[in-house]
Amino acid sequence: MFWDELRRRLDPRAAESLATGPSIEKSIAPLRSFVAEPMRFGRLFLAGDAAHIVPPTGAKSLNLAASDVRCLARVWKAERFSWWFTSLLHKFPENGAIGRRLQRAELDYLVRSHAASTALAENYVGLPFDVSG
């Protein structure tokens, strides 16, 4: 089904020359966070993925890398947001029934609360550079 769908979405020439094979890996990549603190190795300053890993859900990696040179507190706030957003949008079986109910309650709150939706927007767009620790 995957190859059929991919062929439908590709340019006809590319679809025709697509080489396929059996699926050998079906695990899901772990959604993780990491921050190197301090963001340096000796005299080398670390930025971007060398300094921190942000779950893709929060869409922060490149924007955060550009601000690394200015504010570690902003990095931690972006990590917090990405962790929260990932927890909100993905199912984690180990959290059980209560975890799923909490997710639904959080989503309901986010949709119905002006304050919650404003906080989401502020964090998603990007926090100001003057964020203090």
Image: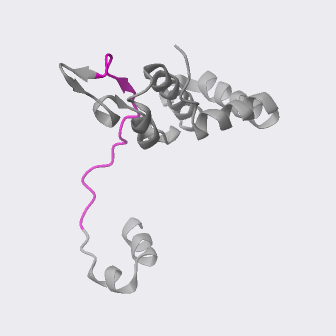
- Position of 128 relative to 2 (above/below): above
Quadrant in the picture for residue 41: top left
**Majority secondary structure of the magenta segment?**
loop
- Colouring scheme, one of rainbow, by chain, secondary structure, one colour: one colour
- Residue with the most extreme top position: 133
Asked whether residue 113 is in view, the answer is no
Q: Residue visible at 41% across and 73% down?
A: 4
Question: Is the N terminus in the top left, top right, bottom left or bottom right quadrant?
Answer: bottom left
Q: Residue visible at 52% across and 13% down?
A: 133
Part of the protein shown in magenta = 21-39
- Position of 64 relative to 1 (above/below): above
- Position of 101 relative to 124 (above/below): above
Q: Is residue 68 left or right of residue 128?
A: left
Count the marks: how many?
Answer: 0
Q: Whole-percent x and y of residue 119?
A: 69, 30
Quadrant in the picture for residue 101: top right
**Residue 23 counted in the magenta span:** yes
Q: Nearer the viewer, residue 11 or 94?
A: 11
Q: Nearer the viewer, residue 86 or 26?
A: 86
**Residue 54 counted in the magenta span:** no
Asked whether residue 58 is in view, the answer is yes
Q: Residue visible at 27% across and 49% down?
A: 25
- Residue with the most extreme left position: 42
Q: Nearer the viewer, residue 102 or 81?
A: 81
Q: Whole-percent x and y of residue 14?
A: 32, 80
Q: Residue visible at 40% across and 70% down?
A: 6
